[in-house]
Image (cartoon, rainbow, N blue to C red):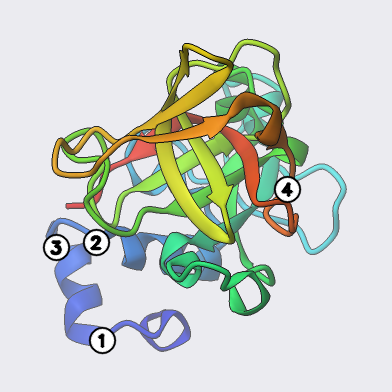
Amino acid sequence: MATMADIPVSTMSGYIYGREMKLSAAVKIARVCSVSLEWLAGITDHPPSITSNSQSREHLSNEGRSAEDKVIKLLPFFDAASFLNSGDLETGNTETEQVPITEGFLVRLNAKAETSFFLKISGDSMEPTLRDGDLILVETKPIEAVSGLTVLMIDGRMIVRRIALALGGQVTLIADNKFYPSQDINRDQLIWGSISSKHPAVLIGRVIYRFQAI
């Protein structure tokens, strides 16, 4: 398992004997072992197994759980560090890995696998809310009234910010870290879109869950 996950054997042994697991290692282990990330994080009680096709995926033990908790979905996994440089969309991580998660976990968050993805945070602009290395779950289904934390692509650079409507038809993008200045853009210039969009100001989705790095 250590070899397949590209993790030192001594580190894997430490995890087995109770050492706190790094988030980057958890992602690798979940993928290699075909278990969900929330099971490794201790959010759910039973490890699932994933079949090789896209049909129903069953848990190792089905007793006492809903139908959604018996299904595993594979969500795209992005690293914000690959979008750090302005205008770097062409070399960004648009071809991505996938991480397993149970459908039941998504249902409880009112999210769908088809419109969700994982994003690894890079930098300290949203501290103390989000730290460098945290993993967040993002729901991309467009809604009219956006609130809370959002993921955006601004001139090819992926960022997480709070959105606030300002006077004069502008939108203010607010960083939780007071050392980062707010940014105002014209409301008409901000559109819903995807990570691969070439529009200069794209609203990708809302942050709905955080797995915090140790």
Residue 22 percent location from the top left of the image: 24, 61
Tell me the kind of residue under disc 2: Lys
Mark 4 vs 3: CB contact within 8 A: no
Observer-side mark, 2 or 3, equals 2
Position of the N terminus, as image quadrant, is bottom left
- Residue 158: x and y in percent read 50, 54
The residue type indicated by label 4 comes to: Ser
Pointers 2 and 4 in contact (C-beta within 8 Å): no
- Displayed quadrant of residue 69: top right
Describe residue 175's horizontal placement relative to residue 13 as left or right.
right
Residue at mark 1 to residue at mark 2: CA–CA distance: 13 Å
Name the element at disc 4. Answer: loop
Q: Residue at x 33, y 59 (%)?
A: 122
Pick the front one: 92 or 31: 92
Residues marked 4 and 1 touching at CB (< 8 Å) = no
Residue sitting at x 77%, y 39%: 114
Ranked by sequence position, the earlier of labels 2 and 4 is 2
Residue 181 position, x and y percent, is 26, 40
For residue 22, which numbered disc appears in the image? 2
Q: Nearer the viewer, mark 1 or mark 3?
A: 1
The residue tagged 4 is 194
Q: Earlier in the sequence, mark 4 or mark 3?
A: 3
Q: Circle 3 is placed at which residue position? A: 17
Q: Which residue is mark 1?
A: 8
Where is 107 relative to 82, above or below?
Answer: above
Q: Position of residue 18 (x, y in %)?
A: 14, 56
Earlier along the polypeptide chain: callout 4 or callout 1? 1
Q: CA distance from mark 4 to mark 3?
A: 41 Å
